[in-house]
Image: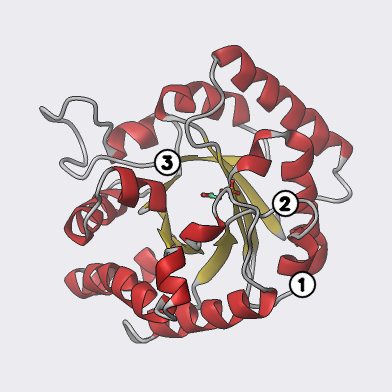
Amino acid sequence: MQAWVIGNWKQNPATTNEVNELIDSLLSAIDERSNDLNPDICQLMVAPTAIHLAAVSARLQQTPLLCAAQDISAHSGTTGAYTGDCSAQQMADAGASWTLLGHSERRQYHQESADELLQKLTHAQAQQLGVIFCIGETQAQYDAKQTLEVLNEQLAVIKELLTQQPKLVKTIAERLIIAYEPVWAIGTGKVPTVSEVSATHEHIKQTVASFADELPEITVLYGGSVNTDNADSFAASPMIDGALVGGASLKAESFLTIASAFSRAKA
Ligand code: 13P
């Protein structure tokens, strides 16, 4: 199964100049590491802000890096009177081939509901955008051993999408990645053990497989304080198909060291 290493830039970098510097260093480091990085084994992708998406995707044409949006509007997949929103169609037109959805920061700061996420998934599907669907439990839920219960509830949106579009089950599954990101591991330097993550990923794969007949095995990435020191150990697990990287994706060197770890381990 192909590995994926995806950089979620969140609300970074601050300026267009800094975005260009990051792209420059990514492209030159990719060149230098051409023996180490094999896009057939490990696909690379970055998710810039909506304001930087068109410029970044233009610069990434003919490179091994794909471009994703960080979010799309729930209200309309195309156009409409929704001030401040960008639609799936607009993100695709700006050069995104994928979008993150349901990141815990969106759930926390924008109170994203299951209904809204279902709308977004439907719009992404209609505009042929692949979806990296983020799920994860809070520290309190982890401490109360509610992780799997919480993940099941968050994954129910995917079940609903597949139920609503039975003819598109295969197409949806082919363009769907689940990113397991424990909220307590994001930006904290705290990580679950590799065996905990592996068991959780196995549960996610089995759960999604139970949603419809003949679903291909779903790709499941781990996210939350992935760095150059722990990437090898996550990459060694057959249950961990890649990483969704925040802070460490803002430096070409650390992002590509993580990508090399997955390229090597999955070769
Ligand atoms: P960090 O890698 O900074 O912990 O962020 C993870 C994340 O939220 C990626 O979506």
Instruction: Tell me the amino acid under the disc marked 1.
Output: Ala
Mark 1 element type: loop
Residue 136 visible in the displayed image: no
| Residue at figure coordinates x 42%, y 22% from the top left | 51
| Residue at figure coordinates x 40%, y 53% from the top left | 104
Mark 3 element type: loop
Query: How would you rate the neighbour count of disc 3 (Cα within 10 Å): few for under 14, some for 14-19, many for 20 or more?
Result: many
Residue 8 on image: x %, y %: 54, 42
Q: Is residue 42 above or below residue 219?
A: above
Alpha-carbon span between mark 2 and mark 3: 21 Å
Residue holding disc 2: 227
Mark 2–mark 3 CB contact (< 8 Å): no
Q: Is mark 3 within 8 Å of ligand 1?
A: no
Q: Which mark is residue 10?
A: none
Residue holding disc 1: 236
Q: Is mark 2 within 8 Å of ligand 1?
A: yes
Ranked by sequence position, the earlier of labels 2 and 3 is 3
Q: With 177 as the anchor, is 88 left or right in this view?
A: left
Q: With 234 as the anchor, is 18 left or right in this view?
A: left
| Residue at figure coordinates x 33%, y 49% from the top left | 108
Residue holding disc 3: 70
Query: How would you rate the neighbour count of disc 1 (Cα within 10 Å): few for under 14, some for 14-19, many for 20 or more?
Result: some
Query: How would you rate the neighbour count of disc 2 (Cα within 10 Å): few for under 14, some for 14-19, many for 20 or more?
Result: some
Residue 105 on image: x %, y %: 39, 47
Ranked by sequence position, the earlier of labels 2 and 1 is 2
Which is more toward the observer, 67 or 15?
15
Alpha-carbon span between mark 3 and mark 1: 27 Å
Q: Which corner quadrant holds the C terminus?
A: bottom right
Ranked by sequence position, the earlier of labels 3 and 1 is 3
Mark 2 element type: loop
